Amino acid sequence: MNDNMIMLSEFERQIDELLLLSSKGYDFNEIVNLINYQKDCWQLCRFDLKNRGNTFNRVNIFENPNNLHIRFPSWFKDDYGQGCHIEGSDKKLNLKVQCVNKGTLKIYLRGVDYRDVDNIRYPVYVNFTTFKINDNLIFQENKLIYHDQPYEFEIVSDDKDMFEIYLEFKTIFDYYPFFLNYFNNVKDMDELNEEYVLFKKQVKFIRFLEHFDEINESSLEMYDFMNKSNEVSLCENEENLLSYDSFLNHYAIHLYYFELKNHIDQLNERIEFLENKLNDYETN
């Protein structure tokens, strides 16, 4: 399973769980608020910093051009220093920090701490694609991570050492931007359930295309069709989304046609072979 399919499966599972909350007594507004919170979490990346040394060790933030949300929580302070917790949604992030005291700067790239109504943590996947420190490339490849399986890096630091951190990452909405439009304008439980049906159809649609991704031209054409849903409201696009079943039937006929054409071509070759044999027989 590739990275975007791993993301998709987990994202779908979480939406499924949230829609089931109505059977547990949650009302419409509570469920919509939980869905919006879940979608917000999937737009973020998180990384943690800690200049490990003694209890006085920490990092100071010098430049934060992306307006990252930065905290120094009490749970991240111990005998080895004060840690720093950072979250942001810009897909290209820069941050300049200075280490206080000699130590080892530890960097953890991870996803946010997303939990369900029972306080159970669920993965929010982030695909980090580029990581640099002071223009030194650490990696430039896909690193799919989440909160409990971070990517860890460390570098020895002296007092007042400056480090410029650069990151690029992708979220599920970079692969499937139309998911941002779901559940935004629903007015009651009936509309929420109707939109959930559309969501499930589109997930099925994506998996269908993934299954046949060797037919590159058709796959790219249909992904382009789905991406256009990000340019219009769900209300305007509902008719197109509902055409999924029609497309699926059309696509199945399309595949069957080529399979049938193969059989016909083979049959014609056999007929031609027999006709040649017959001509040879009559000539002789």
Image (tube, rainbow, N blue to C red):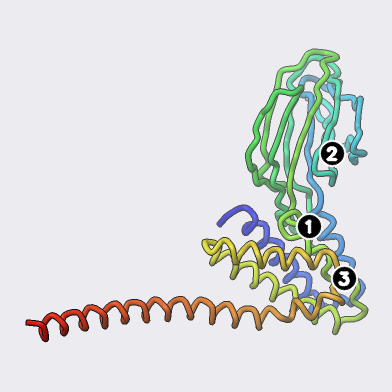
Give, as a three-letter code, the residue at label 1: Arg
172 relative to 209, above or below:
above
Residue labelled with disc 3: 233
Q: How many marks?
A: 3
- Camera-nearest residue between 161 and 72: 161
Which residue matches tag 1? 115
Nearer the camera: disc 3 or disc 1: 3
Quarter of the image for residue 266 reads: bottom left
- Is 117 left or right of 248, judged from the image as shown? right
Sooner in the amino-acid sequence: mark 3 or mark 1: 1
Residue shown at the point (64%, 42%) measured from the top left? 143
How far apart are the alpha carbons under marks 3 and 1?
A: 29 Å
* Residue at x 71%, y 33% (from the top left corner): 131
Image x and y of residue 40, in percent: 85, 56
Q: Which of 106/211 is in front?
A: 211
* Badge 3 amino acid: Ser
Is there CB contact under 8 Å for labels 2 and 1?
no
Q: Which residue is mark 2?
A: 86
Instruction: Judge the density around disc 1: few (<14), some (14-19), many (≥20) Cα neighbours within 10 Å.
Output: few
Q: Nearer the viewer, mark 2 or mark 3?
A: 3
Kindly state the secondary structure of the residue where label 1 is placed.
Answer: strand
Q: Position of residue 41 (x, y in %)?
A: 82, 54
Q: Is residue 150 in sight in this rendering?
A: yes
